Image (spheres, rainbow, N blue to C red):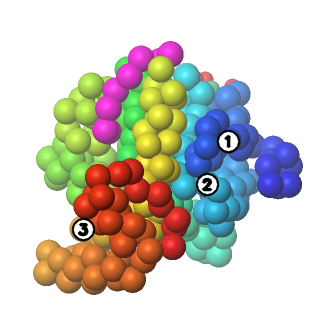
């Protein structure tokens, strides 16, 4: 992809077949999520989502920091009208809308909008140094990119209240215990583990993976009966794919399926 070379604040790589990797690359300001960085990130994700050779995406920062939140310098003098007109916060929703699965590989700080970025992804692999927090209360504001909502739906009301009202931070081990992250690995191996997880998902039936992601995310957004109907319709729809015929035939013929993504 030509665009990959032109990014200033991120780096896009292809670490292994089927996997696109986006590194946030502004270590001097702890990967503070500026408007230009978020614009590049959503652009890169759009390009990876449109690229048929990519089936799963990993977003990471550096070993020291995933992202320290929205850029405070950029926001400090903003008015509500400016924030609305820019729709900067809408970038997080754009990430949530990416149809392919995204694994966040988090090491060091994931604070404020950085924690919300990880929450907008589908799975989190953390290094043992990861710290998750929503410190916006220290700035006289609250999380604006999903923190209050996604955390409450993921780790429950009690702990979310502590995190959002009183800047309670979660260690990697706590985040795993409370169901925020999928697994914890060493600082040396967390990124490889995230890429490995992404590669495994990338090797699966692409349309089923896409609808599975969509259905699970719907569980966080709607009532149980609406979600069950949504899931059932996705299940029925998959019987229109060649991969469903191939997957079931392969099982019955005791061989490995060959997915076509059709
Ligand atoms: N925005 C802008 N700059 C930031 C930043 C941020 N979110 N986080 C860190 N930086 C900058 C610092 O200003 C500093 O820059 P200078 O060297 O030019 O002074 C540099 O990164 C290094 O930071 P520190 O000197 O503070 O380093 P530290 O090791 O002492 O602390 C830290 C690291 C704990 C991450 C600390 O910087 C910190 O608390 N950052 C702010 C975290 C925060 O409040 N995030 C929420 C932002 S609001 C938000 O995200 C809203 C939303 O919901 C979308």
Label 2, label 1: how far apart the Cα atoms are: 9 Å
Q: Which residue is mark 3?
A: 219
Q: Of label 2 and label 3, which has the lower sequence position?
A: 2
Q: Which residue is mark 1?
A: 14
Tags 2 and 1 touching, CB below 8 Å: yes
Q: Is residue 52 magenta?
A: no
Seen in the image, is 135 located left or right of residue 199? left
**Mark 3 surroundings within 10 Å by alpha-carbon count, few (fewer than 14), some (14 through 19), many (20 or more):** some
Position of residue 80 relative to residue 78, above or below, is: below
Image location (x, y in percent) of residue 50: 65, 66
- Secondary-structure class at tag 3: helix
Q: Which residues are magenta?
A: 181-188
Image location (x, y in percent) of residue 61: 58, 34
Residue occupying the point 50% across, 16% down: 188
Image location (x, y in percent) of residue 205: 43, 60
- Secondary-structure class at tag 2: loop
Where, quadrant-wise, is the N terminus in this rendering?
Answer: bottom right
């Amino acid at each position: 992809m030509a665009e990959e070379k032109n990014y200033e604040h991120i780096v896009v790589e292809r670490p292994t077949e089927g996997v696109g990797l986006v590194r946030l690359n502004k270590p001097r300001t702890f990967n503070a999520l500026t408007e230009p960085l978020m614009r590049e990130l959503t652009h890169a994700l759009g390009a990876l989502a449109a690229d048929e050779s990519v089936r799963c995406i990993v977003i990471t920062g550096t070993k020291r920091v995933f992202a320290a939140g929205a850029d405070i310098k950029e926001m400090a003098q903003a008015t509500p009208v400016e924030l609305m007109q820019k729709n900067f916060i809408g970038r997080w929703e754009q990430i949530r809308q990416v149809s392919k699965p995204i694994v966040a590989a988090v090491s060091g700080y994931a604070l404020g909008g950085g924690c919300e970025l990880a929450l907008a992804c589908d799975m989190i692999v953390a290094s043992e140094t990861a710290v998750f927090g929503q410190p916006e209360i220290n700035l006289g504001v609250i999380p604006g990119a999903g923190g209050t909502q996604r955390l409450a739906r993921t780790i429950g009301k009690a702990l979310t209240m502590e995190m959002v009202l009183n800047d309670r931070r979660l260690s990697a081990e706590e985040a795993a215990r409370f169901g925020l992250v999928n697994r914890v690995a060493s600082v040396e191996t967390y990124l490889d583990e995230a890429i490995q997880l992404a590669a495994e998902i990338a090797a699966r039936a692409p349309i089923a993976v896409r609808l599975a992601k969509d259905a699970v995310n719907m569980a966080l957004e709607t009532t149980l009966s609406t979600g069950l109907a949504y899931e059932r319709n996705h299940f029925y729809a998959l019987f229109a794919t060649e991969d469903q015929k191939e997957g079931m035939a392969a099982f019955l013929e005791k061989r490995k399926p060959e997915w076509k993504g059709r």
